Image (cartoon, rainbow, N blue to C red):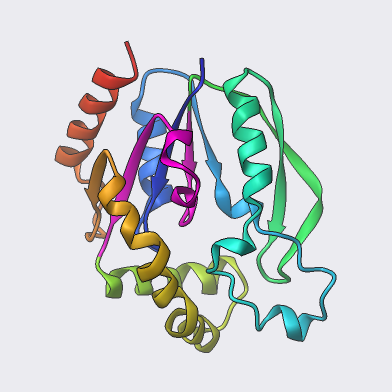
Amino acid sequence: MTHLIAICGGSGSGKTFISRALRDNLRCPSAILSYDSYYRDQGHLPSEERDLLNYDDPAMLDEELLLTHLTKLRNGESIDIPQYDFASHTRMKVTRPFAPKDIVFVEGIMVMQLPKETYDYVIYVDAEPDVRLARRLQRDLTQRGRTAEGVIKQYLSSVKPMHLKYVEPAKGKADFVFHNDENDGLDEKQMAALLRDLKAKLIH
């Protein structure tokens, strides 16, 4: 049986970092599924209009497809993950095969917009706003073809308000809150506590 573990938190909080650490530390077959792959294709719009959209609104993500894929994984079926080009806001023609594992970490800003019952366990990765902004700026400049001006403008106009409206409330629903303000490696004490809780509740 596949267990689904949600890993949510604000942009730049370290969701991917914590997901990879968990995958590497758990002694059972596991994999990471990123909700970022499920942004809706905006190729039908001119590029100028695409740039004006609020990509931090949950409606920009294909929730229906993600739910379908999570159901298939629970049933032991493989899925084909869409591949998204963040520079052009379009879906690529190719997909990536993804096989079910004992544990699938479903990570993303908006994963908790799905019902909590979708998951077996919820982790909220928490970090101070200035830390998250600095990390997002570094990531988007080096990995997503953005400009510093564009990243900061988007953060102030949509990332921050959407975080307060949709993401922050998920903290109260989490089974574990992982505080991740530092940039000097993994907090081993928190990770050990999280691993103990996961093993007690899910891995027997």
* Residue 78 x/y as whole percent: 69, 25
- Is residue 170 at all visible to an observer of this figure? yes
Rendered view: 126 above or below 147:
above
For this view, does 196 lie left or right of residue 59? left
Q: Note whether 79 is above or below 156 in the view shown.
A: above
Disc tally is: 0
**Extreme residue toward the left, this view:** 189
Q: Residue at x 48, y 67 (%)?
A: 139
The one nearer the camera, 33 or 63, is 63
Residue that appears at 55% across and 46% down: 34
* Image side of residue 45 versus residue 203, left or right: right
Question: In the drawing, does residue 168 fall left or right of residue 108?
Answer: left
Rendered-image quadrant of the C terminus: top left
Q: Residue at x 27, y 38 (%)?
A: 175
Q: Image check: 160 left or right of 111?
A: left
Q: Which residues are magenta?
A: 104-127
